[in-house]
Image (tube, rainbow, N blue to C red):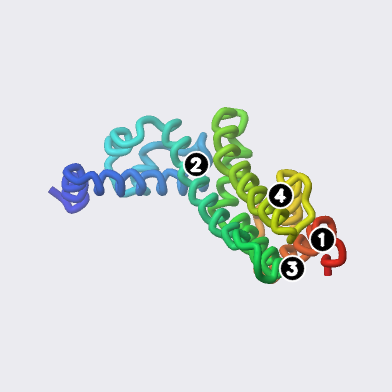
Amino acid sequence: MNAAKTSETGSRSSPRGRIDKRQAILDAAFRVFARDGYGQSCVREIADEARVAKPTVYNHLGDKETLFHEALQAAVGRTVDRSLAALDKLRGSEGDLRATLEEVGHLLLQNHCCAESQALRRLLNAEAARFPDLLNEIQSAGAQRIQNALADRLARLALAKRLNIADPEQASEQFLALLTGPMELRSRLGTRQVPDTELRSVAGAARDTFLLAYAPQGEAD
C-alpha cells in the first residue's frame, strides 16, 4: 500500500482526519474552479489537486455541483471573516475616528482585492445564471452580512455622537461603495493587482467623503 493510500486509510479512523480531508478537497475544488471555470472542471482534476482518490471526493462531498456550492460557501466564509475582523476596529467609541475609518477601509480593500475574493467574484459572475439560488445564498452570507455588521458599528458610533447618521444601513452601503466602486476600473476587472499605495489612497478618499456627509457639524476636517 502506498503512502497516499495509507494516509487516506488512517484518516478514516479519525474525525479530525475526515474534517481535514474534507477541507483539503474544498480548497482544491475552489482552486480548480477558479482556474478552469465550472464547465471545464471535473471531479478527477479536483481529486488530483487534493491528492486523494476520486471516490474519496464523492464520499466526502458527493457530485460536482455539490462541490461547487460547498467550495464557494467555504471561500465566502473566509472572506467574510477577514472583513468582520477589520470591522471590529470600529467597536469602540473612543480614539481617532478618522484614522480608524481609514484603517478599516484599507483592510476591507485589501480583502476585496485579494486573489481569493477576486476569483470568487469571477465565478459568481460567470455562473449566476446557472446557479441563481447559490448567488442569493452567497450574497446573504457575504456582502449583506458585512454591510449589516458595518451598519451596526456605525449605529453605535452615532449613539456615541461620533457620527451624525439617521440611517446606518444606508450609510454602511455608501461607505462600502466609496471603497469598492473605484476598484473595478483600477483593477481592470480584476486582471491587475492594485498596489497597496493605491488602496490606501482610495481608503483615505472614501474616509474623507464619508465624513463630509456624516461627521458632526464642524468635525469633518
Q: CA distance from mark 1 to mark 3?
A: 24 Å
Residue highlighted by disc 2: 72
All told, the count of numbered labels is 4
Q: Which mark is residue 172?
A: 4
- Amino acid type at circle 1 is Pro
- Amino acid type at circle 4 is Ser
CB under 8 Å between discs 1 and 2: no
CB under 8 Å between discs 2 and 3: no
SS for tag 3? helix
Residue sitting farthest toward the front: 160
Q: On the rendered image, what quadrant is the C terminus found in? A: bottom right
- Amino acid type at circle 2 is Leu
Mark 4 vs 1, N-terminal side: 4
Residue highlighted by disc 3: 201
Residue located 75% across and 49% down the image: 171
How far across and how far down the image is residue 148, in percent? 63, 44
Q: CA distance from mark 4 to mark 3?
A: 19 Å
Mark 1 vs 3, N-terminal side: 3
**In this rendering, position of residue 186 left or right of residue 216:** left
Residue located 58% across and 37% down the image: 140
Residue highlighted by disc 1: 216
